[in-house]
Amino acid sequence: MDRRRSLRPPRPNAVQDADATCTFRRDEQDASAADHLKRASPKASDALPLPLYLTNTIFFTLFFSVAYYLLHRWRDKIRNSTPLHVVTLSEIAAIVSLMASFIYLLGFFGIDFVQSFIARSSPDAWDLEDEIDRTLLIDNNRYAAPRSASAVALPSKVVDAEALNTIPLPEEDEEVVKMVVDGSVPSYSLESKLGDPKRAASIRREALQRTTGRSIHGLPFEGFDYESILGQCCEMPVGYVQIPVGIAGPLLLDGFEYTVPMATTEGCLVASTNRGCKAIYASGGATSMLLKDGMTRAPVVRFGSAKRASELKFFLEDPSNFDTLAVVFNRSSRFARLQSIRCSIAGKNLYVRFCCSTGDAMGMNMVSKGVQNVLEFLQHDFSDMEVIGISGNFCADKKPAAVNWIEGRGKSVVCEAVIKDEVVRKVLKTSVASLVELNMLKNLTGSAMAGALGGFNAHSSNIVSAIFLATGQDPAQNVESSHCITMMEPVNNGRDLHISVTMPSIEVGTVGGGTQLASQSACLNLLGVKGASKESPGANSRLLATIVAGSVLAGELSLMSAIAAGQLVRSHMKYNRSSRDVSKLES
């Protein structure tokens, strides 16, 4: 029977139990032998009277010595016309020694080489039962993953399941946990070997507690779809983190009402944003405008001279070449459309910033594939071009950068509203004049004094992060997505307040990444932007960007009013401080 069968997902009921038993348990005799081998920590030299290197040296010497002797004897027989089949006792002994040494060397080196070659060419070729067999019968050190010194040095009581207060596992899972702990089965390979992501996470979770000696009892495990993140969102999961989701709104934006989900652990944030939404609603709503929609990627390439780098710069920025480059770029996706190319030189190094539309996806992978296509195309005419990196930080992704602040990245949005004087006084508890003065001294002058880059606002990052977490966006892209300048000025003879937020680089998508997870998908559905737009590709992601900007507008309005009215500290003392006696809580 072919032992290198592919592992199938476990089946229910009795069939599953039978499969699990076949996979993890042999008959009683084999299990007893395996336990004995594990307790003894077998090594290749344990059954030999000499150290391993001396044994190998003896057999190597024996093999080559008897081979030389036999060749020498056969040469003499040929010269003397003696039949080769006529052998003496010494020649018989030499032949036996040659065969014995050859069998030893083949068994020691040959099997190891063949198995390692098969494992390299097909990493999923061996099922878990075969992995166990190899671990027990062959030197563990060749297959075990390296373990940290701290894991090796842990006392035996550290890995005691009862001491860690963990839930008992089925016997077959317990065997796998032990193999993960001792390093014979890599933790990262559990999903592919078991075919059950949840079971793999459960085993990894238990192994983690035993190797570290620390309980993760408070980290939730049940109630999560681990298959949905496989190969897409998170590797080596052991649970999930709970973040409460609150709702603010309704936000009246462009004539439509939106209830905005916000995932946060900061008290007052949702309440404050909700108050801003109330003020905007009472004043007739806010208006948004999408200024630009384009994701960027900027590789860095190097030439032998600055002159050659300049020649590529002129070629890329020549309008007559753009159509050809766009055709090459757009092959990467049916949604990718190249919009512009901007180059910048540093000596003989050229930074090329590609910008393209990406439909309803945030688009980092899409634009990267398009850039790769163009680089391969350019190397036909610029064969001396050396691609140093697909990203040269001129993009710039997940870092505060002036290029994003000036040129934009993702969605560039401006959102505005006129807040009536009555609303400012009754809802926001302050005055128009106070807000205008505070905005000038805090958001503009104060940020300039601090040397802020894209930070001319009160707390746009708060709202952006909360909506990003709730809707499955990349939270690290909060860095550039929170770039915002908040403007306030009196209008209508100073009676009302005009407020606006300009956000040049909101990076969001409604497909891909974390947007397909159940919780995040539900939040997107609440906003009416779940998935890709069938009528107009990219419409959902653009709408989400304007909702983010509208929510930031509400958050800026409310926080600035709280500061102007002296309410900030009182609000946080009331809503952002726990009344629970921490000393009585479980550690």
Image: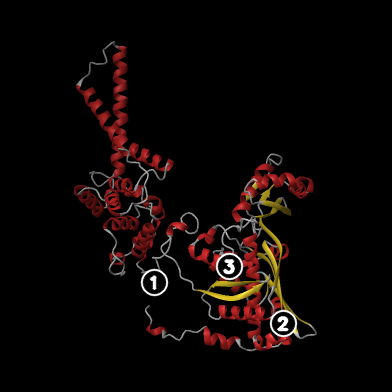
Residue at the image point whose x is 37% and y is 79% from the top: 586
Residue 177 quadrant: bottom left
Q: Which mark is residue 302?
A: none
Q: Which residue is mark 3?
A: 527
Of 466 and 215, the residue lying toward us: 466
Who comes first in sequence, dot 3 or dot 2? Answer: 2
Tell me the residue that label 2 is attached to. 441
Q: Amino acid at mark 3?
A: Leu
Q: What sort of colour scheme is used for the picture?
A: secondary structure
**Amino acid identity at mark 1:** Gly
Residue 118 at x, y percent in the picture: 39, 40
Residue of label 1:
218
- SS assignment at label 2: helix
Secondary structure found at label 3: helix
Identify which residue is drawn at 46% across, 58% down.
228
Question: How crowded is the residue under tag 2: few (<14 C-alpha within 10 Å), some, or many (20+)?
Answer: few
Q: Residue at x 31, y 43 (%)?
A: 53
Height in image: 141 above or below 202? Answer: above
Between 125 and 524, the one nearer to me in the picture: 524
